[in-house]
Amino acid sequence: MTITATSDGVPQWQAVAVGDTCLFHVRDGVLARAFPLEHSTQFHNAPKLVGARMSLPQVAEGRSAWEDGLGRAGDRLWAMTDALAQWCLAECESGRDPWGELELLLAGPADGCLFEDWIDRLRQSRRLRNDDVTLVAVLL
């Protein structure tokens, strides 16, 4: 993902789907864009993403997995690995607010314990697959 600004100063992002990472563009607490997957049922073992072990022709074929968008000040970009991404989409589809939960975690202590405990609780309740979890939050 790269983030730049247009000549008018509008935040602009570009992303390519790599590995099992998904990107969500959230505005005013509402999902504006999901990339590369848009629904929780799309997660499976062979997503169409640019993988680390792909040959150059396979990477070239995967170039359709690019996306871009314009933001506003205060928008949030969330980049996360697949287990957490699937959970976020399922929460949205059920009318719940995963973005508010994530924002509360960001407001907590910076030592990461709150996030780790939250992930453990989601796994124990079987609401989150037991897989690696990475989360990056960018405030535009």
Image: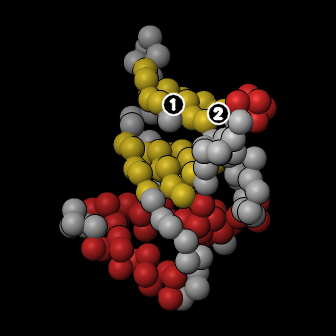
Q: Which mark is residue 97?
A: none
Would residue 100 be visible to someone looking at this image? Answer: no
Residue 40 location (% of width, % of height): 71, 64
Is 51 on the left-hand or right-hand side of 80? Answer: right
Q: Which residue is mark 1?
A: 13
Q: Quadrant of the C terminus?
A: top left
Q: CA distance from mark 2 to mark 1?
A: 8 Å
In the depicted structure, whether residue 71 falls above or below residue 83 = above
What type is the residue that disc 1 sits on?
Answer: Trp
Of 35 and 95, which appears nearest the observer? 35
**Helix, strand, or loop for circle 1?**
strand
Residue 95 location (% of width, % of height): 63, 69
> How is the protein colored in the picture?
secondary structure
Is 19 on the left-hand or right-hand side of 47? Answer: left
Residue 7 location (% of width, % of height): 44, 11
Q: Which residue is mark 2?
A: 67
What type is the residue that disc 2 sits on?
Answer: Glu
Specify few, some or many for label 1: CA neighbours under 10 Å numbering under 14, 14-19, or 20 or more. some
Q: Which image quadrant is residue 73 in?
A: top left
In the depicted structure, whether residue 18 falls above or below residue 130 = above
